[in-house]
């Protein structure tokens, strides 16, 4: 059997920070704002801090693989930024083989309302792995998934999801809905929130500041 298994009750990674499906691990400061005004996460593991050490403290509380994946997702977000897309990036890590599948926001480039970073990465992973069931995968994304992406994550049976910063306007993991941990659904995920939150937030803030300077919403 794979390290995760397809049963939601077994949806956790062995080693590091173990947790059952439906668990939430949080880090960062308890502030919530919109993506264009520096969204933030809700903190449990890391006490709120205004010091320069807060980012390092935040990173040190997470599994090293989670941090590594989020940093790779940030590279994808920067690629979206360079294209003039809202800078959101996603990486899917296939645990048994170590393969990684990436995606970044392409809605404007592809003129496709569904071309969110998570969807792009999930399509790539499913094609390469030969199955829509991504039961042996970890998904890391810089911004809290929206209802469409959270629904796709549930349908793909991804057991472990990491996200950087909350999206109070459209977030469907914690902010507006809790789709990934809803016991009424047939699959639930282990959720880790707040990995590299400052970097994720800063990139979004910079993008929207530039958009406003250009007279765009």
Image: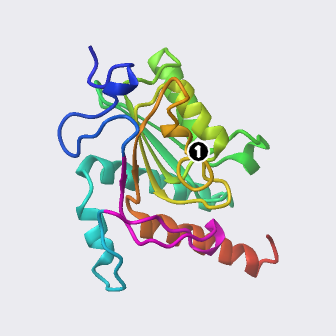
Label 1: element kind: helix
Residue beneath the point at 36% across and 43% down = 23
Farthest residue toward the right?
A: 215
**Image position, residue 190 (x, y; %):** 38, 39
**Image position, residue 106 (x, y; %):** 67, 46
Residue beneath the point at 48% across and 14% down = 130
Q: Which range of residues does the magenta coloring cover?
A: 24-44
| Quadrant of the frame with the N terminus | top left
Few, some or many C-alpha atoms within 10 Å of disc 1 (few <14, some 14-19, many ≥20)? many
| Quadrant of the frame with the C terminus | bottom right
Residue beneath the point at 36% across and 77% down = 48
Is the magenta region chiefly helix, strand or loop?
A: loop
33 relative to 87, above or below: below
121 relative to 143, above or below: above
Drawn side of residue 6 relative to residue 154, left or right: left
Drawn side of residue 69 relative to residue 184, left or right: left
Relative depth, front residue between 158 and 204: 158
Residue beneath the point at 65% across and 59% down = 86
Drawn side of residue 140 relative to residue 51, left or right: right
Drawn side of residue 111 relative to residue 65, left or right: right
**Image position, residue 53 (x, y; %):** 27, 80
Specify whether residue 31 is painted magenta. yes
Location of residue 209 by image quarter: bottom right
């Amino acid at each position: 059997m794979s390290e995760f298994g397809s049963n939601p009750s077994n949806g956790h990674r062995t080693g590091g920070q173990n947790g059952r499906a439906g668990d939430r691990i949080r880090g960062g400061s308890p502030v919530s704002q919109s993506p264009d005004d520096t969204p933030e996460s809700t903190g449990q593991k890391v006490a709120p801090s205004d010091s320069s050490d807060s980012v390092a403290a935040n990173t040190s509380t997470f599994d090293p693989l989670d941090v590594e994946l989020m940093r790779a997702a940030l590279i994808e977000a920067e690629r979206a930024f360079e294209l003039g897309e809202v800078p959101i990036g996603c990486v899917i890590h296939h645990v048994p083989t170590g393969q990684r599948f990436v995606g970044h926001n392409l809605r404007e480039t592809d003129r496709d309302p569904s071309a969110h970073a998570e969807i792009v990465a999930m399509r790539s992973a499913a094609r390469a792995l030969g199955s829509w069931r991504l039961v042996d995968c970890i998904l890391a994304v810089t911004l809290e998934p929206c209802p469409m992406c959270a629904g796709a994550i549930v349908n793909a049976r991804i057991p472990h999801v990491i996200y950087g910063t909350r999206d109070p306007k459209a977030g469907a993991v914690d902010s507006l809905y809790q789709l990934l941990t809803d016991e009424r659904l047939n699959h639930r995920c282990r959720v880790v929130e707040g990995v590299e939150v400052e970097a994720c937030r800063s990139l979004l803030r910079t993008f929207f500041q530039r958009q406003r300077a250009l007279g765009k919403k």
